[in-house]
Amino acid sequence: MSRTQVAPIAATCSCRGVFDAAALPPDKTRAEAVERAWAQLCAPGPTLDAPTRVRVIELARAAWRGAGPTEPSALAAAVHAVASDAEGITLEFVEDLERRGLPRLQYLEVLGVVGRLSNVDWYLRGLGAALPQPVPLGLAGVTTGRVAPGSRLTDSWVPMVGDASAPHVLDALVDEGAALRDLHEPAYIDIARIGEGTHGDVLARPQIEFIAARTSYLNECFY
Amino acid sequence: MLSHTLFLRESAAAADIPLDLGSVATGSIPNIDAGSELLTFTDAMAADAIADVAAERQALVDRVGPQGAEKAVGVAATYQMMNRLLDAVGAPVRGRTHLEPVAKALGFEPADITR
C-alpha cells in the first residue's frame, strides 16, 4: 500500500478478528489489553452512555481523516480538539465547553475515550490490521455514574484524585482510570519498575524511551 | 517529552551508552541499537493518523525482529494516548525544576513552556 492509502475498516463489530489478518502478529498480552479497551470504549461510561461513546469514536476517527467538527455541539468540539490538536487546548477552551453545556467530568470522559481510542487505532494501524467498527454495548441513557468521591480540581483543568500524574489523570472517573492503566502498562513498561534504568523487555529501555520521547516531541507534549 | 527524555538519559547512562539527547528533537539518528529504523518508524507512526506504515514497519522487523517491532508499535501507540490525555487535562510542566536541564538539552527555555 502507498503511504497515501488508508487502513481498511473491518466488517466485524468486535476487535478480536482484526488481529488475524494483521501484517505483524500482536503480543498476546497487548492484544488482550486492546480487546478489553475496545469493549470498554463501546460500553456505558460514568457520564456518557454507550451510543454517545460510539459517537465520540466516530467523530474522532472523522477528525483523523481530516474532517472538521461536523456538528456544532460542545461535545463535538471537544472530540475534535482532543483528537487533532490536544497540544492547543487551553483552560479557556475547557471553560468555554463548560459554558456550552459540557461539564468537566464529561469532558474528562470524552478525552479518555479519544485518548484510549488513539492507542487502539494507532496500535492496529502499526500492526497493519484493520480497524473495528464500534457498536454500542449499552442502551441510550444508561451510564454507570461511578465517580471517585473527593475528586476535585487540583493542579490541572479537570477533577483529579490528587495532583495530575501520568497514569492517574482519569482517576476521577474510577473505571476509566483503571482502563487507562490496563491499556498503557502492557504497551510501555511495568510502572512499578519505571525507576529501573536497565529494565526493558524485547526492546531495551533506551529504545523504549526514545520512541516515547520522540513521539511526545512530535506531538508537542511537554510533560 | 521531558519526562521520557529524562528516562532516556538515565537508561542510556545505566547502559553506558553515550547519547545526544538532542536527537529527540532534531531527528538525528540516536546512538542506540536500531536507532535509524526506530527513528524512521516512530516518525512515520506519528506523522499521520491514517497512512499505512508498511515499509517502515518492515524495515524495523528486518532489524529487530517481529517481537521487537511489535513492541515498538505498542510504545508508539500508547504515547498517542498519553500525549493527548496530559495535554488535554492541562497537566502542569512548569515548576518541575528537575526537568529544566532536559528542556535545555532539547532546545527549549524552561520559561517559555506555557503549561
Image: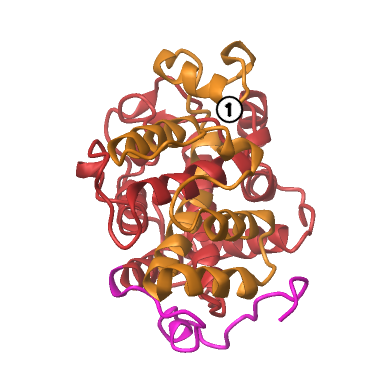
Chain colours: A red, B orange
Between A206 and A163, the one nearer to me in the picture: A206
Residue A59: x percent and y percent? 66, 60
Q: Which residue is drawn at 36% across and 43% down?
A: A173
Q: Does the magenta stretch include residue A195?
A: no
Between A69 and A124, the one nearer to me in the picture: A124
Label 1: state its secondary structure.
loop
Q: Which residue is drawn at 34% across and 48% down?
A: A205
Q: Is the magenta stretch mostly helix, strand or loop?
A: loop
Label 1 amino acid?
Leu
In the rendered image, the vertical position of residue B16 relative to residue B78, given as above or below: above
Residue B58: x percent and y percent? 56, 75
Between A112 and A195, the one nearer to me in the picture: A195
Residue A103: tell me if it is visible: no
Residue A90: x percent and y percent? 64, 27
Residue A154: x percent and y percent? 40, 20
Q: What stretch is highlighted in magenta?
A: A1-29
Tag count: 1
Q: In terms of image quadrants, where is residue B67? A: bottom left
Say which residue label 1 marks: B106
Residue B105: tell me if it is visible: yes
Q: In terms of image quadrants, where is residue A100? A: top right
